Image (tube, rainbow, N blue to C red):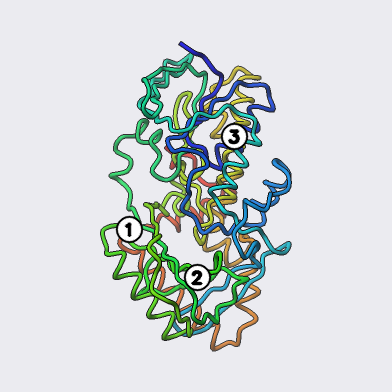
Amino acid sequence: MRSVDVIIVGASLAAAAAAKRLVDAGLETLIVEKLELPRHKICSGILSPRGYRFLIENFGPLPAQTLHEPTSCRGVTFHFPSMVSMPMDFFGGTTPHLHRKYSDHWAIQRSGAEVQDQTSLLSLEDHGSHVEVTIRKKGGETTTVRARYVIGADGPSSVVRKTLYPEYNKKIPWFFVGQKFHEIIDCPLDEEYFHFWFHPKLGHYTWSHARDGRQIVGVGYKRGDNFQRRHEYVKSYLEDKHGVKLKPADPDHEGCAENFGPSLINRYVLGKGNVLLTGQGAGFLNMIGEGMSCALHSGAISGESIIEAISRNKPVEDTYKRMIVSEIHHTTDQWNPLMIAFGRPHEADFPAALMALSLPDRIKVIKDIWNFLLLYKEFKWGRQIARASLERLFQGTYSSQRWW
């Protein structure tokens, strides 16, 4: 049986960040990915300034092939049912528009880790001193590899998480997030911005932006609804209210399951024993659905935790839960009403943009946001968000008792 120091499941940005730390520390690291690389990744590709800084500092300048057109994003514009719009520039300037198929693969290659693509995780067993991981190459034999540690960096529908917590997926609300691509007839929306709608009739998550000469129309809603009907309603709304005229959708639409809950209510799933979870598999997701920056940072922390646990001969689970607190603060603060009102948790200045509006428009925006938040009432997150906000206010942190 082959032995390695660490196996990372999923060739994601979180995996690349973890692998970079581990390989730099001299640990033998194997990444297994179920798809053929470079693999397609469903994502808008709009990276935050914080994520961009991480990529530059850890992996170097981005090659041209890792970017979509337009190659950069200036900021985000919020749109409201009252027809008030709020453009907000990112702090620090524009950020890259990543082509995830190539940017993820580039980062994985730059990490220096060994990679086995078209390889699926079948099972893992934590024996305390090591983890036995059973994998299968597409069209090949099943093999078992022994690792000191395992990192699950395999996204919101994580197989590693399902192995650790079989009932988890049944206990949380799931959303479907889908996007279609359209040739443009006329689009007044500024292509330098990512556009997001706080509109309860459009769904839980609605966005649009330019990509490679086409316009994305994206919708998110509770899983089980009809994607086609939702998309057509949003497309009609954009034409009626914003003058966005698009040709019928191209056939290459895409979608995936998402869970927005953990980062809102401080309910992260960090793993147990010698198996860690990171990125969206652990619940890290920034407001407006940008998950790349927190995937990079949480991935790096998972790698650093293993290095720390080895050097100090400490349990890696406890080490990770101690070291990941900074990223939990950064991510959950973005959803914290008190931090939003009195701090600067985001990378664009929402309070300043709000105060720049006239008083009547400010009142409209606040009412619109409140009505939008009522969409989430059925999930009973209100009290949990309030409790987390008060914990942060009076204790300076979020309760670790809420983490899995």
Element on which disc 2 rests: strand
Q: Nearer the viewer, mark 3 or mark 1?
A: 3
User: Is 90 displayed left or right of 179 in the figure?
Assistant: right
Q: Earlier in the sequence, mark 2 or mark 1?
A: 2
Q: Residue at coordinates 41% horizontally, 65% vertically from top-left?
A: 180
Which picture quadrant has residue 73? bottom right
- The residue singled out by tag 3 in the image is 18
Q: Amino acid at mark 2?
A: Gln
Q: Earlier in the sequence, mark 3 or mark 1?
A: 3
Element on which disc 3 rests: helix
Q: Earlier in the sequence, mark 3 or mark 2?
A: 3
Q: Nearer the viewer, mark 2 or mark 1?
A: 2
Q: Residue at coordinates 50% horizontally, 28% vertically from top-left?
A: 116
- Name the foreground residue: 93 vs 218: 218
User: What mark, if any, has residue 215 been given in the picture?
Assistant: 2
Q: Nearer the viewer, mark 3 or mark 2?
A: 2
Q: Amino acid at mark 1?
A: Phe
Across and down, in percent, residue 31 comes to 52, 30
Q: Please say if 332 is above or below 195.
A: above
- Name the foreground residue: 304 vs 42: 42
Which picture quadrant has residue 220? bottom left
Q: Amino acid at mark 3?
A: Ala
Mark 1 Cα shell of 10 Å, populated few (<14), some (14-19), many (≥20):
few
Label 2, label 1: how many angstroms apart (C-alpha)? 32 Å
- The residue singled out by tag 1 in the image is 379
- Name the foreground residue: 305 vs 103: 103
User: Is 227 displayed left or right of 274 in the figure?
Assistant: left
- Name the foreground residue: 357 vs 161: 161
Across and down, in percent, residue 108 comes to 59, 37
Element on which disc 1 rests: helix
